[in-house]
Structures are given as C-alpha cells and as structure tokens.
Image (cartoon, rainbow, N blue to C red):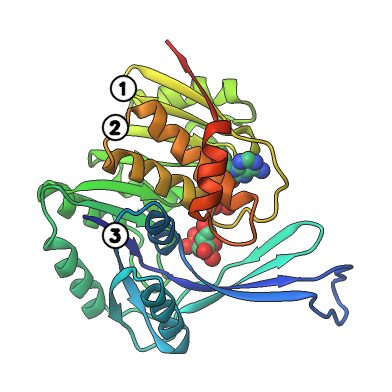
Amino acid sequence: MIVTVTLNPSVDYIVRVEDFSTGHLNRTNQTAFYAGGKGINVSQVLKELDVVSTATGFTGGFSGRFIEETLSAKQIKADFIQVEDHSRINIKLKTDEETEINAAGPDITSEKVSALIDLISQYGKGDTLVLAGSIPSSVERDLYGKLAETAHQNDVQVVIDSEKALLEPALTTPLTLIKPNHKELSGYVGHEIETVEDAVKHGRDFYDQHQIKYLMVSMAQHGAVLFAGEETYIATPPEGNLLNSVGAGDSSVAGFLAGLEKGLPIKDTFALSMACGAATAFSEGLAIKKDIDHYLPLVQIRGLK
Ligand SMILES: Nc1ncnc2c1ncn2[C@@H]1O[C@H](COP(=O)(O)OP(=O)(O)OP(=O)(O)O)[C@@H](O)[C@H]1O
Ligand SMILES: O=P(O)(O)OC[C@@]1(O)O[C@H](CO)[C@@H](O)[C@@H]1O
C-alpha cells in the first residue's frame, strides 16, 4: 500500500486575472478550487493510474472538509488526523506568469503529532510512505527525519519530496526516492544547476554520497535526470502549451511510484513519470488518464553509462 502523508494540505484557489496590476482593484476572469498539498496530489494522480493509496496528514475546519470530500468523491482512501484550526488556502495567481502564495498552515498540537507518528508506525513491509510538501510552521522542523526513521525501522520504503530544510534531517535514513527540482538540487550541492549536464554531474556526486535508491532531478520543460544505481537516464518531455505548473512535480512522483508498483522496467517507470508531469503541465488541473496515455509515447529516455 502507498501511503501519502500531507502534513500541510491546502485548498488551492486558482485565480486567473488578465491585465493584472498590483495596488489596484483586479477582477477575476476565472476561478477554481482544488484539493491540494503535495501528497494529496500524488494520491489523486495515482488514482488516475489505477494505483491504490491512502492519503493521511492533518486536516481541519471547512477547508479540511472540502479536501476530504474531494478525495471521497474520487474514491481515494483518506485517514486524516483532525485538528482544530482550518487547513490552509493557497492562492495560485495566474496572470501572464504564475504567482503562488502558500500559507504557513494550521496550529498542530504535540498530541496530534504523536497521533500521526502512531498511525505511521502501523505500516510495515510492502508499504511505501510518501512524505511530501511543507510542514505547518507550528510543527518541529525535523519531523520528516523522525517519520522516515520510524518507517525504515518497520521495513517501509520512504519517498520524500520537500524543501531542503525539511528533507535534510531524513537524509541519514535510507530512502527509496527523492525528487528535488534543479533549483533545490543547487541548494544541496552549492552549484547553480542550469543545464541537464550540470544536473548529471552534480546530481551524481550528491547521489553517490547518500543512501537513496532513486534520485530524480526534475527540470520542468527540460525534463529530468534519474540516478538509479550505476545508471543515469535523461528524459526529454513532450512539447506543449504550459497551462499549469502547480502539481507537475507531484504528478511525476506519482507516475514514478505507479511504475514501481506495477513492476515496470526503470526506463518505462521514468517515462511514465514524465508523461504524468507533462499531462499536468499542459492541463488546467492535475493529470488525467487520457492525457497521460497521450503523452507517454512522446517522452524520450536515453541512458548514459
Ligand atoms: N513546461 C513543461 N513541459 C513539459 N513537461 C513539463 C513542463 N513542466 C513540467 N513538466 C514535467 O513535470 C515534471 C516536474 O516538473 P518541475 O520540474 O516543474 O517540478 P516541480 O518544480 O517539483 O514542480 P511543482 O513544484 O510546480 O509541482 C518535469 O520533469 C516534466 O516531466
Ligand atoms: O507549501 P508546500 O507544501 O511546499 O506546497 C503546497 C503546494 O504548492 O504544493 C502543491 C503543488 O505541488 C499544491 O497543491 C500546494 O498548494
């Protein structure tokens, strides 16, 4: 079973404004609400790929109810710990560029954190834990480190997609997959990663220094680089019209996990990951099955040795 953990779920409020101007009254051309947060997005794309997952984390208030109702309508299993405060609302402003305002998240008591650790301790061999996104600012920064260690001791595979400060405490634990984007990788290696060649060089150094089974460095329209043991693969994604980059990274994580779950060869797993990322980038919301199937044959994967 894949268990996605979203400690800081969100209602993503998408606001499209033409001719946006700061300091003035702007009126929207289009708005939409989505249930978001990185782990929740992973669960939603896994569902499109017919892979079962359980979504957990903290939800609260009217916004938390919206998130749970959305998952329930999509028949995605959810097992959230309820908190007093409401789940956050993140604003995704789409003008001629994309601007995001992500909230810090609700207050979470130490009792609720303990309840989450207990819940995660129930999983064991054959399970995969996906720790994704930010941690509410009221919660200790090293929680991913603790959750990863607990999971690892129980033979649970651990996947993390989060910012450096939150992922770093977990880097002493063996991990199955991490997916920094090229900017995040720059923060780890102390070099600006601008090209695929940079990612290959510095990603390999980083990979060799850590106990990570798969390191996927995503580079938006330039695709991604995958390190898998001695092998390095470069993916070129399909070309298309970027409509929405929110959740493209989460979709690529979902595609990769689905490939592993289905026992696909690693190149096909990587291709599925890229097709999911593109299917999200080229649509208004998250990737749907029809688009993933459409983009999959258009992904190019080449191996380096
Ligand atoms: N413009 C694009 N064209 C084609 N594929 C894209 C594009 N943007 C994203 N993708 C696909 O999605 C994957 C993940 O994108 P990206 O590198 O932007 O992740 P991210 O920074 O984690 O994204 P986010 O945090 O916005 O979800 C890429 O590796 C690629 O496969
Ligand atoms: O603030 P975080 O947790 O880092 O990111 C949250 C978020 O931006 O990530 C998802 C897209 O990846 C969105 O659904 C959500 O709003």
Q: Residue at horizontal 46%, vertical 82%?
A: 66
For the N terminus, which image quadrant? bottom left
Q: Amino acid at mark 2?
A: Lys
Mark 3 or mark 2, earlier in chain: 3
Residue 3 in the image, given as x and y percentages of width and height: 26, 59
Q: CA distance from mark 2 to mark 1?
A: 7 Å
Tag 3 and tag 1, C-beta contact below 8 Å: no
Disc ID at residue 53? 3
Ligand 1 within 8 angstroms of badge 1 C-beta? no
Q: Amino acid at mark 3?
A: Ser
Q: Amino acid at mark 1?
A: Gly
Residue 120 in the image, given as x and y percentages of width and height: 18, 63
Is 168 displayed left or right of 201 in the figure?
A: left
The image shows a total of numbered marks equal to 3
Q: Residues within 10 Å of mark 2 (few under 14, many from 20)?
A: some
Q: Residues within 10 Å of mark 3 (few under 14, many from 20)?
A: many
Residue 222 in the image, given as x and y percentages of width and height: 63, 33
Q: Quadrant of residue 266?
A: top left
Q: Nearer the viewer, residue 288 or 88?
A: 288
Disc ID at residue 213? 2
Tag 2 and tag 1, C-beta contact below 8 Å: yes
Considering the numbered disc 2 on the image, is that residue within a helix, a strand or a loop?
strand
Residue where numbered disc 1 is placed: 229
Considering the numbered disc 3 on the image, is that residue within a helix, a strand or a loop?
strand
Q: Residue at horizontal 46%, vertical 22%?
A: 233
Q: Residues within 10 Å of mark 1 (few under 14, many from 20)?
A: few
User: Up-down: is 121 above or below 113?
Assistant: above
Camera-nearest label, 3 or 2: 3
Q: Nearer the viewer, residue 23 or 142?
A: 23
